[in-house]
Amino acid sequence: MRRITVFLAIAVFAISSVSAQDLSKILNDHYKASAQDKMSKITSATIKGNISAMGMEMGLTLYQARPGKLRVEADLAGSKVIQTYNGTTGWTYAPAMGILQPQQLGAEELKSIVKQADMDSPLWDYKAKGNKVELLGSSDDGSAYKIKVTAAEGDQMTIFINKETSLISKMVSTQFANGMDMEIETEVKDYKNVKGIPVAHYLATKMGGQVVSTITFESVEYDQKLDASMFEKPVIE
């Protein structure tokens, strides 16, 4: 019996070692395909496009700057919706939604904006971010690898890496909304090269299997000079 137990332990160790080697190769191929070496040198990004949600079409502009700063501007019902994050604190200003003065974001809202502010792949430098990654195998149709990312605070996300391109094709996470946990699936596609870096120009978000919003990017510009004040509390003019 002891010999069998030893053999089982060896088999489990061997399988774990193979999985670790596979995961390492998948990640390295992803870093190379996404030109992470070039992306790491980019200091800012200005992205313009459109968002479609709840039957409405809105113009959208995102400003990102290292380290971890974000400003989002959208046009809603003739007025601007502004969300900012300076790397520590975030604010929202949305008159059309009844937020007539800039309000500071709560802890749950900050989680989402922190992820959006990260200019790199969510798989890049995961150890330094305090995250853990695990290879779950392949997608149901076999077209992608599934990698589970567990953040330091416990939140989890499953990232799908296309086997042909080694680029992210989908992200799945769980979010508490309307008094219940909802699975949120984001489809990522239409990659175009910007300064040798592949950038997804289309994202579709689904909740409960239904598309709730789509984002289409029209232009992406890197390394524009962005004033630090852009990421602070919105100034009402």
Image: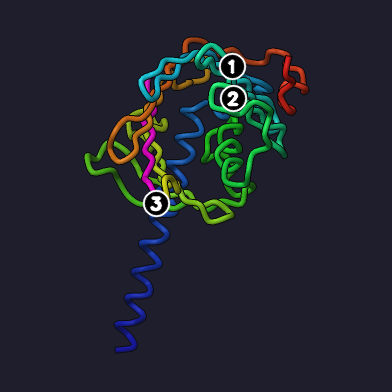
Between label 2 and label 3, give the one nearer the viewer.
2
Q: Main secondary structure of the magenta part?
A: strand
Q: Residues within 10 Å of mark 1 (few under 14, many from 20)?
A: some
Amino acid type at image mark 3: Met
Which residue is under mark 3? 180
Residue for point 29% across, 82% down: 4
Q: Where is residue 10 drawn, in percent x and y?
A: 37, 72
Residue for point 22% across, 39% down: 141
**Mark-to-mark CA distance, 1 and 2:** 7 Å
Q: Where is residue 43 drawn, in percent x and y?
A: 69, 23
- The answer to which quarter of the image holds residue 100 is top right
Query: Is residue 40 magenta-colored?
Result: no
Which residue is under mark 2? 94
Q: Where is residue 42 drawn, in percent x and y?
A: 65, 22
Whether residue 135 is visible, yes or no, is yes
**Mark-to-mark CA distance, 2 and 3:** 25 Å
Q: Quadrant of the N terminus?
A: bottom left
Q: Which residues are magenta?
A: 180-190
Q: Secondary structure at mark 3?
A: strand
Earlier-in-chain disc, 1 versus 2: 1
